[in-house]
Image (cartoon, rainbow, N blue to C red):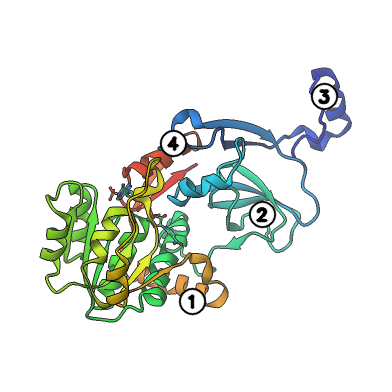
Amino acid sequence: MPCECKETGRLMHLILCLAHPRSLKMVRAKRWIMKKQFHGFPKNSDFELKTVDLPPLKNGEVLLEALFLSVDPYMRFSSNKLKDGDIMMGEQVARVVESKNPTFPVGTVVLVHAGWTTHSISDGQDLEKVLAEWPDSLPLSLALGTVGMPGITAYFGLFDICDLKGGETVLVSAAAGAVGIIVGQIAKLKGCRVVGSAGSDEKVEYLKKIGYDFAFNYKTVKSLEETLKKAAPDGYEIYFDNVGGEFKNTAIKQLKKFGRVAMCGAISVYNLTGQLPPGPSPEHVIYGEIRMEGFTFKRWQGEVKQKALKELLKWVLEGKIQYREYVIEGFDNMPAAFMGMLKGDNVGKAIVKM
Ligand SMILES: NC(=O)c1ccc[n+]([C@@H]2O[C@H](COP(=O)([O-])OP(=O)(O)OC[C@H]3O[C@@H](n4cnc5c(N)ncnc54)[C@H](OP(=O)(O)O)[C@@H]3O)[C@@H](O)[C@H]2O)c1
């Protein structure tokens, strides 16, 4: 149990703790806070590691210990909703280590948006159990990746936003990342031709290995436009946009009539401080009758989400979808993992392991 006494003087602290022996066993949480609003690319000095003593559990509450924490691009652009000194936001896979809530007994593994913290207390309202059918053979970290938020994003982005049909040509940017590798593999499963871009030759090789028909390093090609044309001379039905910016502007011009764009993310502009690249030409969008739709994974909840998670899990277990993770060990490395992911160190889902 955490220490209940708020006394900071050593002697008084000891007296109070002896009067309440349960409070002697203190639970200390380590937390990463955003010390200062990011300006441009985040820096080490923007983060600070803090230690907090957690209060004792009230009835209905559980104490959670993080097992895996996610670092995601949205943390960069959503950080402007944080105040200096707030805990960094984020989802984690955690285990219940103490419980006063019968729905979540000790040992239950849950997903929780507790932020960058080693321990947290929840009243259960914000907890989501991992799928009951999760096999021991599968890393629980996948609940933050292929069978979690990025998986859901890829799944609904393709099926609901892009109305994916077999035989179509699909272009995916940041294709070797958490969302991108799933997008490409689902599109292949459905009989599409898939073209992907990534920021290193190693990533390009990986994309080819998992079935991408054409993959290229966007950092080294002479002309993005020419490369996209070469990859699909007749154009694309779908562009799954993970990067936004100039790449998106160029990609949109290569869409066929009734082309669809899933505007999933715009990582190429998240760290820009000056003027943003201009948007797509309205003329092209209007006359091309292109549907561009912003969306977030949160739209799909309840049964429809559970059905998708089960399908993703099934595909993984059947070997139809390969997963890949980029695992960084140690909670103290959260900022390094986050900044590394923003720079592109990761192939697959970036994960921090406790
Ligand atoms: N709408 C939603 O609900 C939703 C949900 C999840 C993610 N997203 C968005 O989807 C995108 C991908 O997210 P993710 O979780 O799968 O991340 P991720 O792809 O695993 O990691 C980010 C990747 O972005 C690439 N990148 C970094 N700077 C870039 C730049 N200037 N230009 C092009 N690529 C750059 C890097 O790969 P390279 O080496 O290839 O450059 C890096 O590995 C992000 O934009 C994210 O915000 C949206």
N-term-proximal mark, 3 vs 2 = 3
Residue type, numbered disc 2: Val
Residue type, numbered disc 3: His
- Tell me the residue that label 2 is attached to: 106
- Would residue 320 be visible to someone looking at this image? no
Residue visible at 38% across and 64% down in the picture: 263
- Residue 307's tag is 1
N-term-proximal mark, 2 vs 1 = 2
Q: Residue furthest right?
A: 19
The answer to whether residue 67 is left or right of residue 107 is: left
N-term-proximal mark, 4 vs 2 = 4
- Residue 42's tag is 4
Q: Position of residue 319 (x, y in %)?
A: 30, 68
N-term-proximal mark, 1 vs 4 = 4
Q: CA distance from mark 1 to mark 4?
A: 37 Å
Tell whether label 1 touches label 3 (CB within 8 Å).
no
Of tags 4 and 3, which is closer to the observer? 4
